[in-house]
Image (spheres, grey):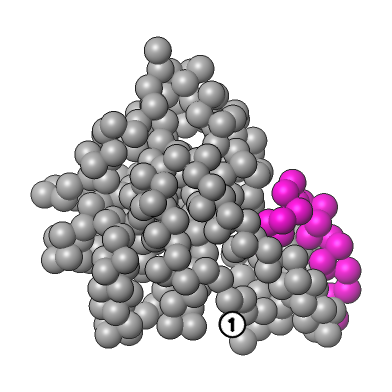
Amino acid sequence: MNADLHCHSAVSDGTLQPEALAQRAKANGVELWALTDHDEVGGQQRAREAALAVGLPYLTGTEISVTFADTTVHIVGLGFDADNASLQAGLAATRGGRTQRAIEMGESLAQAGIAGAYEGALNYVNNPDLVSRTHFARHLVATGVCADTYEVFRKYLTEGKPGYVPHRWASLRNAVTWITQAGGVAVIAHPARYKFTPNEEYALFTEFMMHGGRGVEVVTGSHSSADAAKYAKTAQEFGLLASRGSDFHSPEESHADLGSLPDLPAKLTPVWSALASRIQRPA
């Protein structure tokens, strides 16, 4: 199945509205779609209605930032009740620290000679609770500091570079619990990005499963074919469900477009097989 279960709208740090994403996913041949905005479910009703209107089956989604081993790790939630009070409260608390972090990022960039970056980033924010590094990157490109967002993240906003400010996100336990108690499945997003040692990665997967996590992204926009093969093996070793998603943010910025990914490797159990009853289908 051409499922795309990881992407972002303008409700978080994407550039397209949920309705435009639904139309793009349908046009690109996506057969099952989820919008997974960062620490936010505010776009879920719009995404679901837009998907069903174009004949596209839909799963609820979000991507929660957690801190594990002093590293920011992302946990995707799929197929949950978006109205669940505990989930909504947890996401609101996670969003709460972003504004202060963004102000400090602007101050750090100012010390490096780039003034007004925080105010500039706000010009690209649709949801003021969710100002992020991506919004700063767009400002730095628009003002000519960098040629593109890839250059931004080579020179700024990452550990050891100007503009980097760490933030203490939700715990792994809390994020997985919020998702599962709302009836969803928790998935480790793009695991190749974290650069953990083998021991740290084993600890991540072990603790994730201990708290009720059930899936891992095997095929995603930032994974190479070697990464996909590695995490296909990991999914089999840990008995995890395999997920697939482009992590699409923008037509100009993203590694992969909606619906453009290769298939999941053979012999894996896709995450949507455990969510059949949660898929919302057109009438």
Quadrant, the N terminus = top left
Q: Front-most of 256 and 99?
A: 99
Residue segment shown in magenta = 113-132
Task: Give the residue furthest to the front.
Answer: 85
Q: Front-most of 14 and 228?
A: 14
Q: Front-most of 242 and 84?
A: 84
Sort mark 1 into few (<14), some (14-19) or many (20+) by Cα contacts within 10 Å: few
Residue drawn 65% across the image and 83% down it: 161
Tell me the element at label 1.
Answer: loop
96 over 2 or under it: above or below: below
Q: Along the horizontal axis of the image, is 80 left or right of 219?
A: right
Q: How many marks?
A: 1
Task: Give the residue furthest to the left.
Answer: 267
From the top left corner, tell me how far across and down residue 49 is, in percent. Answer: 53, 24
From the top left corner, tell me how far across and down residue 173 is, in percent. Answer: 40, 68
Quadrant, the C terminus = top left
Tell me if residue 220 is in the magenta stretch: no
- Residue 70, can we see it? yes
Query: Quadrant location of residue 68?
Result: bottom left
Residue drawn 52% across the image and 69% down it: 170
Residue drawn 66% across the image and 43% down it: 10
Residue drawn 59% across the image and 34% down it: 18
The amino acid type found where label 1 is placed reads Glu
From the top left corner, tell me how far across and down residue 138 is, in percent. Answer: 72, 57
60 over 70 or under it: above or below: above
Task: Give the residue furthest to the top.
Answer: 283
The residue under label 1 is 159
From the top left corner, tell me how far across and down residue 206 is, in percent. Answer: 25, 73
